[in-house]
Structures are given as structure tokens and as C-alpha cells.
Image (cartoon, rainbow, N blue to C red):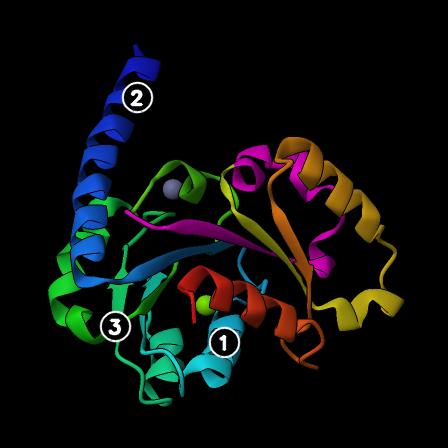
Amino acid sequence: MKVKVVSRILQANDRLADENRRLFKEKGVYVINLMSAPGAGKTTLIVETIKALKDRVSIGVVEGDIVGTDDAERIDSLGIPVVQINTHGACHLDANMVREVLDELPLQDIRLLIVENVGNLVCPAEFNIGEDMKVMLLSVSEGDDKPGKYPLMFQESSALLINKIDLLPYLDIDIERIKSTARALNPEIEIIELSCKTGQGMDRWVTFLEEKLQI
Ligand code: MG
Ligand code: ZN
């Protein structure tokens, strides 16, 4: 019984996600659903992506957090349209939550919309929001066992960004294990190693986005 209820919830969510997707297509908005554990660096990645692309692409951001507006304030200070969703306990964003805030964004003027999901390695991967692609951010400080422990995140993502590679000399982790496990789960996944702090690898991420956006 429980399984049936969950699948019905996911089916209802998928229908709303399709509606969002139609709206995004109509307005010409490319949407990224950015997922990671807490503290992997999603907001910093968004800030650095904005700095790299904002002169060429109009960007908007949706910030998902259980409570608080700290991350949205960081984006707002860059002069980028941003709307905060507070889930009040829910550990992921769903299509309905995203739909409810879309009126607050100038969608017709936005080409790239980055949705920062709630920090969590489990259910964000189950709930489509109408995105063009899911991107998974993994910090090397989380260890090299995460693809094997949270496979759905890696299976659902078009790209895996391995962040904080500047910390590798101080950590006892095998980055090749992360990459090989992720590729075994999802042979199509684009894997980019980077550091939002030093900027290393950011050019590859920006090039990947430029190709997606055809700019
Ligand atoms: Mg954040
Ligand atoms: Zn959840």
C-alpha cells in the first residue's frame, strides 16, 4: 500500500513538472535543478556561474531552503532576480512549490534559471520540477563512497560536478572511485572536477553550459 501512495504522489508531481516544462519552453527558459548534500557549495557555484556568464546570459535563481534567506540574499546582492522558497521542513523541492513562485520572476527576460534544491542526497532526485537537466554537486570532503550509497542522484543527473578539489591534498579519498562508480551508474554523465574557491575547472563548467544554452 505504502508503495502505491508514493508512486501516486510522484505521478501527480510529474504532471505538474510537465506543466512547468511547457511554460519554461514557451518563455525560452533553460532550467537547471541543482542538487547536493548540505555544504557542498551550491550557492557558491551559483554565484561564480553568475559572475562568469551574466554579461552574456540573463540569469534568474530560485533558492530552496527549509528556512532562512541567507542564500537568496547572496544572489540578490549580485543584482540577479531571485526568489526564495522555504519548505518549512520538507527536504526537497517539488514541481508545485516551484510553480507557486514563478510569477515572482521575470521569466520572459530570463534565459537561464538555476534552481538550488534543498541540501539532501535522497529525495530531490525523485521530484522533477520541469527542469532541462539535473546537476549534482559533490564535495570531495563528503568522501568517495557517495555514488554507491545514493545512486539515484547520480543516475538522474546529466552532470556531476566534483567540487573543492583544492582540498584533495588534505583528504584521504580516491577521486577516481567517485568517477568510476558514477559512470557505472550513469554512462552518459558529464563529470567536471572544479574548485569554486580557486576557480580551477570552472572554465569547463562554463563551456558545458554555453553548449547547452547555445551561446
Ligand atoms: Mg545554499
Ligand atoms: Zn524530501
Identify the residue at image location x=56%, y=51%: 159
Residue 7 shows which numbered tag?
2
Q: What residue type is labelled 3?
A: Ile
User: How far from the left and from the top, in percent, is residue 84?
Assistant: 27, 68
Label 2, label 3: how far apart the Cα atoms are: 33 Å
Residue at mark 3:
110
Residue at mark 1:
49
Q: Can residue 126 be seen in this view?
A: yes
Mark 1 Cα shell of 10 Å, populated few (<14), some (14-19), many (≥20): some
What is the tally of numbered marks visible in this picture? 3
Q: Which of marks 2 and 3 is nearer the N terminus?
A: 2
Q: Which of 18 and 171 is in front in this view?
A: 18
* Range drawn in magenta: 130-155
Q: Which of 9 and 80 is in front in this view?
A: 80
Q: Nearer the viewer, residue 1 or 42?
A: 42
CB at disc 3 and ligand 1 closer than 8 Å: no
Q: Which of marks 1 and 2 is in front?
A: 1
User: How far from the left and from the top, in percent, is residue 118?
Assistant: 41, 55
**Image side of residue 166 versus residue 27, left or right:** right
